């Protein structure tokens, strides 16, 4: 019984260490580098969401391109 409790305790500690490292890294990545967004509605047709309201597309929004002013003709820019 004592051995099984030690295993659970080690597993829980390892999980907590990984959790407390992974969450700040993920939040920083999503805030500074890129984030994932869903495109719904007819506002982006025909480039995105060609099926209309029946379907939605998922896009990756690159924060570095906008922050470094590397936007080129033909790029889709999202304003929040």
Image (cartoon, rainbow, N blue to C red):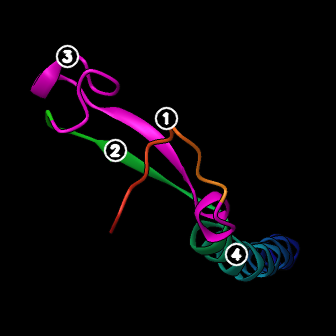
Give me the C-alpha separation between circle 2 and circle 1: 20 Å
The residue carrying pointer 1 sits among few (fewer than 14), some (14 to 19) or many (20 or more) residues within 10 Å by Cα, namely few
Q: Which residue is mark 3?
A: 51
Give me the C-alpha separation between circle 4 and circle 3: 39 Å
Judging depth in this view, the residue of 43 and 39 nearest the camera is 43
Give the image location of residue 34, x and y in percent: 60, 59
Q: Write down the region rendered in magenta.
A: 43-69
User: Which mark, residue 46?
Assistant: none
Give the image location of residue 45, x and y in percent: 23, 26
Give me the C-alpha separation between circle 1 and circle 3: 21 Å
Outermost residue, top direction? 51
Q: Which residue is mark 1?
A: 74
Q: Earlier in the sequence, mark 2 or mark 1?
A: 2
Give the image location of residue 70, x and y in percent: 67, 56
User: Which mark, residue 19?
Assistant: 4
On the image, which quarter does residue 51 sit in? Answer: top left
Residue at 25 percent across and 18 percent down: it is 50
Give me the C-alpha separation between circle 4 and circle 2: 26 Å
Q: Which residue is mark 2?
A: 38
């Amino acid at each position: 019984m004592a051995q099984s409790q030690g295993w659970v305790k080690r597993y829980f500690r390892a999980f907590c260490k990984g959790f407390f490292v992974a969450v700040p890294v993920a939040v920083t990545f999503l805030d500074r580098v890129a984030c994932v967004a869903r495109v719904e509605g007819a506002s982006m047709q025909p480039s995105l969401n060609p099926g209309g309201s029946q379907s939605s597309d998922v896009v990756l929004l690159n924060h570095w391109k906008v922050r470094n002013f590397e936007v080129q003709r033909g790029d889709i820019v999202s304003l929040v």
